[in-house]
Image: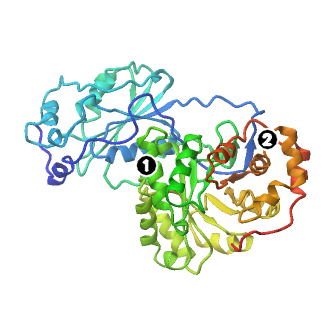
Amino acid sequence: MKCLETLFLVLTLLFSAGCGESAGEAQPNTPPNNANTEIVSEDQTMESNENNTLVVYFSATGTTEKVAEYAADILHADIYEIVPEVPYTDKDLAYYTGGRADREQDDSSARPAILSDVENMEQYDTILLGYPIWHGQAPRIISTFLERYDFSGKTIIPFCTSHSSGIGTSDTNLYSLAANAEWLNGERFSADTSREEVQTWLDSLGLISDTTAEVGVFNFETHTVMLNSGYEMPINGLGTYSLHGDECINSVKSALSNGVRLIDTASAYGNEEEIGQAIREAIDEGIIKREDIFVTTKLYPGSEMENPEAAIQDCLDRLNIGYVDMMLLHHPDPNDVKAYKAMEKFVADGKIRSIGLSNWYVEELTEFLPQVDTVPALIQNEIHPYYQENEVIPFIQEKGIVVQGWYPLGGRGHTGELLGDSVISEIANAHGVSSAQVILRWNLQKGVVVIPGSSNPDHIKENTELYHFALTEDEMNRINALDRGEKHDWY
């Protein structure tokens, strides 16, 4: 058997077998790229969005999985993990011991069984095929996959991960297994490959399409908006400012059970550990998958922004959910540029996906934005009918930045007054919905993402039911006229 030179690879392959999405039908992913802000209503005819690109991968130590996820994110492609019917153990993966992996790589006819099928392979025109290098070649389970489907007329682009070996003949040796496909030259990636490196490779292949018109668009069918970072974010979620302990855990799990996919927290809330526990429990109970939810947290001014790398890692450790979808700076601070640049580094490392700001207004943004390299994906400010920010919102949106509103229902002792406002109550009665639903829908139709907070399961559920009615132009104008410029917190 052909030897590999490095002890590092031997040690690496002693770790656990591949991890990632559950096996089965290809899972839809999310991302592409930048620009204007608009709203797609339910009444507009939507073009078919069937995906024609699939990222397929087998991962032994998680390295290939990371590159595959980057590729799927960048291309907005579906993703499918090749999961062995009999998982590989550490003993199976121990090199030069006569173990399972050694025996399979020695036997060109070996075909390890795969747990499940890609049920809709016919829809895909382009297949990115990822695998680790085992003894200089692709694992035999890749051969199993290639012999399972008809790839006639499809394009296959292989990529591999290894410590030091190149892709070598590992890709060309696969060509005969799908001879009717068009094979492109493969690419090798290391364990520390960044998202930007994967994007550069895909761009060189001409696979990254121009999707700038999608950024900032509120899609009322999928209940999501495309961020300028290339990720989709739900447009309604749960705020957790006042939630702690079991109440926090139960509220988050109730929200996830009722379809909420956006959870907002912050280090200053003191509940990141509970949020993380609730999410992990929901994943274990089959309520959600990690890739289906969007989690936001924030760094607070003072010591956290003074020592941002440690503070960011603390947030990640407290949440303990693998990565954070969005991290914001909670308020302006003398060290805010330093802290923002630290977040940019964590984005490059794949630990944070998008970054933004909270409680930044026109003056603050005008000073801040020229000092950083990454345009914020999101700005989160207080927004409700009594404090509407009608000049700030378009200023932000025109820069390709999505706006999110905290305290959408008034907050801190003001909710009752706002929900009881005669204009809002009258509109609610006309639609057969609650005042809270009217206010949240008003925000959405203004292009503002909403994160109302609640510990009441009925209210949490009600706050998600925002898509079966729409406010008329007259009703929007009547609520717009309620603006008092009345801020309900100091931020």
Q: Is residue 151 left or right of residue 452?
A: left
Query: Label 1: which residue?
Result: 280
Q: Helix or strand or loop: what does disc 2 sit on?
A: loop
Q: Residue at x 46, y 67 (%)?
A: 312
Say which of 450 and 273 sits in front.
273
Say which of 225 and 22 sits in front.
22
Mark 1, Cα crowd under 10 Å, few <14 / some 14-19 / many 20+, is: many
**What label does residue 433 carry, if any?**
2
Q: Is residue 102 left or right of residue 355?
A: left
Q: Are marks 2 and 1 in contact (CB under 8 Å)?
A: no
Circle 2: residue type: Val
Q: Position of residue 177 (x, y in %)?
A: 30, 23
Q: Quadrant of residue 135?
A: top left
**Quadrant location of the C terminus?**
bottom right
In the rendered view, would you say 287 is above or below 14?
Answer: above
Residue 183 visible, this orientation: yes
Q: Quadrant of residue 381?
A: bottom right
Tag 1 or tag 2, which sits nearer the N-term?
A: 1
